[in-house]
Amino acid sequence: MRQLALRFLSHGRLERGQHATARTRQHLVLPSPAQRGRLTETALENPSTRYSAYLRLCDVLRDAVTEKRSILVGFDFPFGFSRGLAQRLGLAGPPWRAVWDEIAGLLSDDEENRSNRFVVAAELNHRISGMAFPFWGCPPKHAGLCLAATHHRQHETGGLAERRLVEGRVRGPQPGWKLLGTGSVGSQALTGIPIVRRLRDDPALAGHAKVWPFETGLRPVAECDDRALVVLAEIYPSLVANQPHEGEVKDSAQVRAIGLHFAGLDERGALAETLAGDPGLTPEERDVVATEEGWVLGVTALPARPQSPSGRRAKPIRVPTTAIHASHGVR
């Protein structure tokens, strides 16, 4: 397997017209080339908008493809939703891609971070249930018949699970249906998925970029398409312990730590196995993960448990001392 350079993008939600500041979670840390098998962090960039971060990533990934370097890009938001969403929306084709295309077709997200994500959520709810289910969480001005500011408590009767399979195996990640509030990731998913889609479909990257696990399957990267030089994956930085440097923003430390962790796995030749996901998944579950729900890279061999809002905490992992990464987002 080629040595993977790791750059991480945590694509959060900037509010209308909001730009990045020193205290926001919008960081892009670029590496120097690997030297003697070790990866070193060399630069911290702070793109002011989602769009500028996207353009910077395009440059980085196109350069990697031109130089024939393998690269893993991690995004800190869900790549999928609970099984059944595509069917409820009446979409055809591979479920994950059908949902991605539908979201991208509905979302407006301009160069100044102005998006209509709450309108999109309300429209999807209208088509799914005719009421404020399954997406929830919004400012009062966006609340209405098909989108509520508070939880609807309808998952048991509504036919769509609150949590994905992976969220039943690790404590912490919030459901993708939650758009606003502490720990919410739904807005990140609605604005971030179209950006990952654009990267995957970029003419300069097409044929090289693969979305894990939807296009690679749950298997070691060495067994995947040799042209998959760019692997786009979902991550969860809180899987590993972190210690912020003096004056460092917490979110930057989290992404730095997860980058160190995966870089360390790569140096030891152990990264490929993490792409196989949890070996405890049943064949049916693996199919759901690989075609619709997605998975969080690094969640492997954890004991399964019944899905519930609370779950077993993942053990903090002590990480090596060198890595490269990037993050983008805002709380």
Image: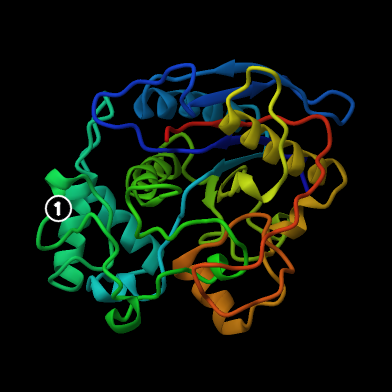
Residue density around tag 1, few if under 14, some if 14–19, many if 20 or more, within 10 Å: some
Which residue corresponds to the image point at 31% horizontal and 70% vertical from the top-left?
86
Camera-nearest residue between 143 and 211: 143
Which residue corresponds to the image point at 28% horizontal and 53% vertical from the top-left?
137
Residue 127, above or below 150: below
Camera-nearest residue between 86 and 259: 259
Residue holding disc 1 = 143
- Horizontal and vertical percent position of residue 32: 72, 19
Q: Give the mark count.
A: 1
Q: Identify the residue at the far left of this view.
A: 145
Please state which amino acid type lies under the numbered disc 1. Ala
Q: Quadrant of residue 68?
A: top right
Give the colouring mode of the picture: rainbow
Look at the image and tell me in which quarter the C terminus lies.
top left
- Horizontal and vertical percent position of residue 6: 67, 36
Which residue corresponds to the image point at 29% horizontal and 83% vertical from the top-left?
157
208 relative to 298 in the view: left or right: left
138 relative to 302 in the view: left or right: left
- Horizontal and vertical percent position of residue 305: 62, 78
Residue 77, above or below 127: above
Q: Quadrant of residue 221?
A: bottom right
Q: Secondary structure at mark 1?
A: loop
140 relative to 54 in the view: left or right: left
Camera-nearest residue between 34 and 74: 74
Residue 31, above or below 106: above
1 relative to 103 in the view: left or right: right
- Horizontal and vertical percent position of residue 188: 39, 44
Which residue corresponds to the image point at 39% horizontal and 43% vertical from the top-left?
192
